[in-house]
Amino acid sequence: GENVEQHPSTLSVQEGDSAVIKCTYSDSASNYFPWYKQELGKGPQLIIDIRSNVGEKKDQRIAVTLNKTAKHFSLHITETQPEDSAVYFCAAINNNDMRFGAGTRLTVKP
Amino acid sequence: DGGITQSPKYLFRKEGQNVTLSCEQNLNHDAMYWYRQDPGQGLRLIYYSQIVNDFQKGDIAEGYSVSREKKESFPLTVTSAQKNPTAFYLCASSGGLAGQYEQYFGPGTRLTVT
């Protein structure tokens, strides 16, 4: 089955800096890679996703890159703001085999 | 106001008792899911359901049971056979084929068993 590793587990940046979170996966058949943001006491919320036929996707300050050969994908947040502080989860999905990373706690210091 | 509701937010039970967690959605989604979240770990899939009256085991189904009698409802029962039931439980739903589209999550239920 799929195995997803996420790094780092915690990340602290200064407001305005960029943040990068990386995930690797093991199942080359995985074809859908969403990223979720979870704020304290709430359920996760999708912030961006990418499918295996695309190498990069951008939505304002957020971008995701996918390297299928190396089986890794990354979340990039530019111009970070204090409200970006949350736990971020990656996931790798092959049909109905859904595996999530362990999460990255991002803290943006004002 | 569309979305997913889970109730209650906090639930306390004594060891040996079964407990049922509620999950309702009014998004007209076909697929629904239950996840368990433990500190320092990612979400782990317990069960999912693609359509009414059908559900499939996820990675950690032992000690749990579900039903899907209505499209909008997917209750999870944590049985006394679940060895370590204290956790944060998240319900989600999505349109289309299970796993292939954005999942909308509820606010979660924190279950404490003593």
Image (cartoon, coloured by chain):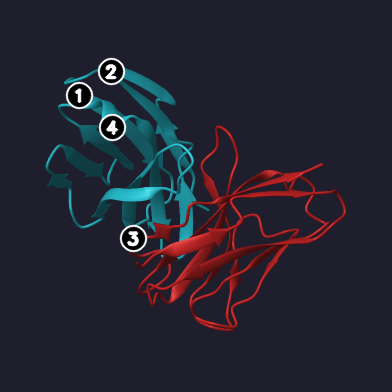
Residue B74 in the image: x percent, y percent? Answer: 57, 71
Residue named by callout 1: A18
Residue type (three-letter) at the residue carrying disc 4: Asp
* Label 1 SS: loop
Residue named by callout 2: A13
- Say if labels 1 and 4 share a chain: yes
Q: Residue at x 45, y 45 (%)?
A: A42
**Label 4: how many residues lie within 10 Å, few (<14), some (14-19) or many (20+)?**
some
Q: CA distance from mark 3 to mark 2?
A: 28 Å
Residue type (three-letter) at the residue carrying disc 2: Val
Residue named by callout 4: A84
Reading the chain from its start, which is encountered first: label 1 or label 4? 1
- Say if labels 4 and 3 share a chain: no
Horizontal arrangement in the rendering, residue A50 relative to residue B61 (left or right):
left
Q: Which chain is red?
A: B
Q: Chain of mark 1?
A: A
**Label 3: how many residues lie within 10 Å, few (<14), some (14-19) or many (20+)?**
many
**Label 2: how many residues lie within 10 Å, few (<14), some (14-19) or many (20+)?**
some
* Label 2 SS: strand
Q: Chain of mark 3?
A: B
Residue named by callout 3: B102
Q: Chain of mark 2?
A: A
